[in-house]
Amino acid sequence: MSEFSANIPAALQWRGETDGYLEILDQTLLPVRAEQICCRDVPTVVEAIKLLRVRGAPAIGIAGAYGMVLAAAEARRQHLPAAAAVAHVKDRAGELATARPTAVNLRWAVDRLLQMVGSAGSPPDPDQLAESLLAEARLVHAEDRDLCTAIGRHGAALIPAGDILTHCNTGSLATGGDGTALGVIVTAWNQGRRFQVFADETRPLLQGARLTAWELVQRQIPVTVLVDGAAAHLLKTGRVGCCVVGADRITANGDTANKIGTYGLAVAARAHGVPFFVAAPSSSFDLTLATGEAIPIEERAATEVLAPLGVPAAPAGAEAFNPAFDVTPAELITAIVTERGIIRDVGPATVAAVLGG
Amino acid sequence: MSEFSANIPAALQWRGETDGYLEILDQTLLPVRAEQICCRDVPTVVEAIKLLRVRGAPAIGIAGAYGMVLAAAEARRQHLPAAAAVAHVKDRAGELATARPTAVNLRWAVDRLLQMVGSAGSPPDPDQLAESLLAEARLVHAEDRDLCTAIGRHGAALIPAGDILTHCNTGSLATGGDGTALGVIVTAWNQGRRFQVFADETRPLLQGARLTAWELVQRQIPVTVLVDGAAAHLLKTGRVGCCVVGADRITANGDTANKIGTYGLAVAARAHGVPFFVAAPSSSFDLTLATGEAIPIEERAATEVLAPLGVPAAPAGAEAFNPAFDVTPAELITAIVTERGIIRDVGPATVAAVLGG
C-alpha cells in the first residue's frame, strides 16, 4: 500500500462480523459528494452493482464475495434450516454473478465463495457457513489489495518516460487496493517518477473525469482530463510515453474487453508507436474463452448516451448505440501486467506461461 | 434544395434591407429550444460566433459576411463621413475575421466583402457601400446554398452501400444550404438510398447529439447517436459502409482540420478498411498553407470538458486539454468532395487540379 492510500476512501468495506454489513462508496455521486450506502441484503448489493454505485472489475468481484456473506445472513434472519440455507445462498449466488455480464471477476469471486457452501446433501451449520463465507470474502478482498501492489510494482518497472494516458477508472475505487492501471501509475509516482496523467473522460459515464481525476487530485498527482475524441490528437503531439488501461475480461489469447473507447485508443496508440499496456489481476482472465469474439458485451440504457449527467442532449426520436465495453485484440497490446508477472508478445502461449493455464 | 429542407430552420437569415438585421438560430439551446437572436451590430455577431450560437465553417463565413453589412450600418447610424465609415468597416472586419481562428471560411468571406469597401482615398458613399455589401453577403449566402447542392450531388454518387458514420454537425445548421457531409447524406437519402446514420455525439459540445440528430429527426432519416469512444467498436462490426465528415480548413496537400475526434475516427476507419470522405466547399481550402501542421488549432475553455452541458463532472484541481480541432492527414482521406468535383488520391497535385490553385 502506498503512503497516500489512507487519503482515498475505499470503494467498499465490510463493517462488523457475520451480522455486519457491506458499506459501499456510492460512486455515482462522485466527485460532488462522497456518500456511503449500507448493504444488509443481496438485492441492495445487486442494485449497487447494476447502477454502478460500485464498479470496476476487481471491486465488483469483492462486492460479489461480500454479497455471498449477506446471502448467508439473510438465511439466518429467516431461520432457514441448513439445507434451505444452502439453497438460498446458491440462488443468491446466481443473482450476484449475473448482475453484470462482461467483467469475469464477479463470477470468479462468487464461484469461489460458492465452493465454501458445499452441497445441500451435507449442509454446513448456518452460523459456520456465515463465518466461513466472511473469512473467504475477506481473503478475496485482502488478496486483491496485494494483487494491486504486485501489479503496481511490475508495471512501474515497465512504463517508459513521458506522460501517461489512461482510460476509465482503474484505481482504488475500482479495486481493493491502489488499483490496476492506476496502481501502476501511482506506484511509479510514489517511486519518484514525475509525469502528467492524461485521463480520458470516458463517456458515457465519465469515470475518467469523475473518478480517476478525483483519485489523482486526492493523491496530488497532476491530472489533465480530455474528451475521448481528443486522445488521438494528444498521441500525435508525442508527449505521451505510454497508455495504461485495465481490463474487464481477458481471453486465453490475450484479447481484452475493457470500457468502451479502449479499442479506439489502442488503434490510435499503435498508429503513433506508443506502447499500450493492460494491467489486470489473474482473476480477470477467462481461459475458457479462446478469443475476444466470445466475450458478451453489455449494452446499457440509451439514456446514458442521450442524456449526459441526466441532462437531455439529443432530440426525441434519436436512437442510441451504447455498448459498455469493446474488445482490444491481443496484437494491439504491448504487454499485459498481472500480479504474476508481465505477459509480452501477447498470445495463447505467453498468456498460458504466466497464468499457468 | 431537397424537398425536406423547408422543415429545417435556417442557421441564419438576413431580415430586411440595408437597415435590417441578421437573425441567428441560437444553436447552443438546441435541441431543447429553437430560439432566434437578432444581431443589429458587429459585437453581437462576434459574440454569437465565439459562443457557438452559430457554428460550422460555412455558416460562420456567411455570418461574417452579414457582419460586414452591420459594420456599414453602424457607420451610417453614427453619421460617419465616407472615409471614416470605410475605416470603421475595416476595423470591424478584423474583429469578425478573428472571432475564431481555425475555420478559414470566416476570413475568406470577410476578405471577400472587404474588397467591396475600397480604399479610404476614394471612399464609396456610405449608402452605396451598405448596399453593395448586402448584395455581396447575399451572394455569399446563396452561393453556399448552391455549393451544398453540388457537394451533395457529387458525394451521393460516391458513397458505397451500408450505414454511414458522421462526426459533429455539417448540415443546414452549419451551412447556407443542406450541408456539406450531411448534405451528402441527405442527398443520398432523397435519391432513395436507405441506411442508418450513426452520429458521433462529438464531445465536448455534443454537436452530433444535439444538432445532427435534431436535423435528421426533422428530416425523418433514422439516426443513432453513439459516444465518440464507441466509433471504433462500431466500425469493427462491419455495418458502416463509410465515414463522411466536414472540414474547417484544408491545406494545399489535402490535410484537413475538423472538429476534435475526426482524426481518431479516420485512424480507426483506416484500420477497418472503411472509406473516409471529407466534404467541403472550395472556400474551406487554404492553399497558402502547405500542410496541416501550419493550421492554428483553437484551444477552448476547460469548462467545456470539465462541466458537460454545464454540470460539473470533474473535481476541483483537475486540468483540461481542450483543442477544438484536430488535423487528419491527407493519406487517411479516401476522397474530398467539393462543389467543383471529387479529389481522389488526395495530395498537392490532385487538390490543385480540382481547385484550380
Image: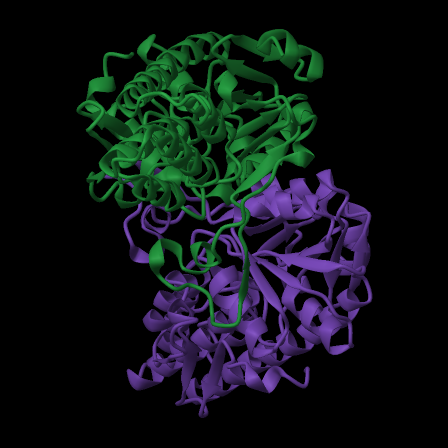
Chain colours: A green, B purple
Q: Position of residue A227 (x, y in %)?
A: 45, 44
B332 with respect to A108 (left or right): right
The answer to whether A114 is drawn above or below residue A47 in the figure is above
Query: Residue A180's spot in the image, x, y percent?
Result: 43, 21
Residue drawn at x 68%, y 77% is: B146
In depth, the one of B328 and B221 nearer the eye is: B221
Mark yes or no: residue A304 visible: yes
* In the image, residue A246 above or below residue B272: above
The one nearer the camera, B353 or A200, is A200
Closer to the camera, A236 or B202?
Answer: B202
Q: Is residue A332 left or right of residue B84?
A: right
Q: Residue at x 19, y 40 (%)?
A: A35
A6, above or below B118, in the image: above
Q: Is residue A187 left or right of residue B64?
A: left
**In the picture, residue A133 is in which quadrant?**
top left
Q: Residue furthest bottom?
A: B16
Q: Left or right: where does residue A126 sit relative to residue B288?
A: left
Is residue B61 shown to the viewer in this render? no
The quarter of the picture where the C terminus of chain A appears is top right
Q: Position of residue B315 (x, y in %)?
A: 26, 39
Vertical position of residue A301 compared to residue A227: above or below: below
| Quadrant in the rendering for residue B71 | bottom left
Identify which residue, B273 or B247, lies in the foreground.
Answer: B273
| Residue A217 occupies quadrant | top left
Residue B324 location (% of width, % of height): 47, 49
Q: Give the residue at x 52% y 39%.
A: A101
